[in-house]
Image: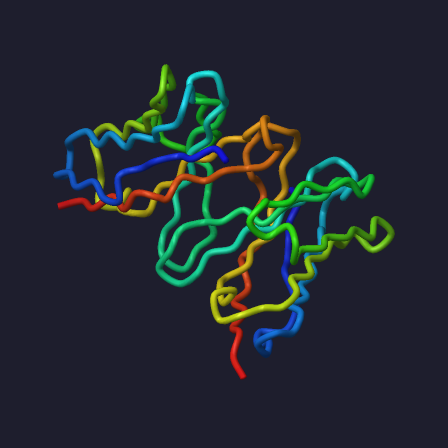
Amino acid sequence: QVQLQESGPGLVKPSETLSLTCTVSDGSISNYYWNWIRQPAGKGLEWIGRIYASGSTNYNPSLKSRVTMSIDTSRNQFSLKLSSVTAADTAIYYCAGEKSTRSWFDPWGQGTLVTVSS
Amino acid sequence: SYVLTQPPSVSVAPGKTARITCGGNNIGRKSVHWFQQKPGQAPVVVIYYDSDRPSGIPERFSGSNSGNTATLTISRVEAGDEADYYCQVWDNSSDHQVFGGGTRLTVL
């Protein structure tokens, strides 16, 4: 069963770039779309974007100008960069797999809290 | 962009039936997935492709989708069903995923 684990700094300064990595284990990174989803405290889920093993991406239009996703199939990892962060970007960030377009998110990582503060 | 609308909260007594709606323009033409999220945990799918149920999810959970509304139905509600529920679709007109705002289910 594929498992996901997010990693990265838990604290980022305003105006800097948030960087997170998701490691895929017990499965191939080549068979899924890989997504980033975030959730501010006490609020709902927001889809950030996804990347396929080929490197093709889809981003949430509301974040597109600040988001870059990449994938390293040799290391079974994919990554998120979110630039020019503000306090509004403080959230739990989840990575999640998606077997095909129009399918559901499964599996999910446990989530990692990123706080934007000076 | 495509918008999914859920009621912020639904309350139900134990043993009764809870219905959580997800409204969207012609949502009946899309595939809807439902997630359950308990405090401190990642979401878990409880219904996929409108009405399919993953293994391990009780038969009490069911889904339907028609017209402008998709519905998650939880029969014989138990205290353990208390959670936040989110609907999700793929918007093929803009190539991105969309979540509803979420519904908090309270078991009275």
* Residue at 87 percent of width and 52 percent of height: A74
Disc tally is 0
Q: Position of residue A83 (x, y in %)?
A: 66, 65
Q: Position of residue B83 (x, y in %)?
A: 31, 47
Q: Is residue A21 above or below residue B97?
A: below
Please tell me in which quadrant of the rendered image residue A85 appears: bottom right
* Residue at 55 percent of width and 64 percent of height: A112
Seen from this angle, which residue lies furthest bottom?
A118
Q: Nearer the viewer, residue B78 or B19?
A: B19
Please tell me in which quadrant of the rendered image residue A28 appears: top right
* Residue at 72 percent of width and 55 percent of height: A68
Q: Nearer the viewer, residue B21 or B56?
A: B21
Question: As drawn, is A110 to the left or to the right of B26?
Answer: right
* Residue at 50 percent of width and 38 percent of height: B98
The way the protein has been coloured in the rendering is rainbow
Q: Position of residue A44 (x, y in %)?
A: 40, 51
Question: As drawn, is A101 to the left or to the right of B36?
Answer: right
Q: Is residue A20 above or below residue B3?
A: below
Question: As drawn, is A81 to the left or to the right of B16?
Answer: right
Q: Position of residue A97 (x, y in %)?
A: 63, 42
Q: Nearer the viewer, residue A76 or A80?
A: A80
Q: Is residue A98 above or below residue A45?
A: above
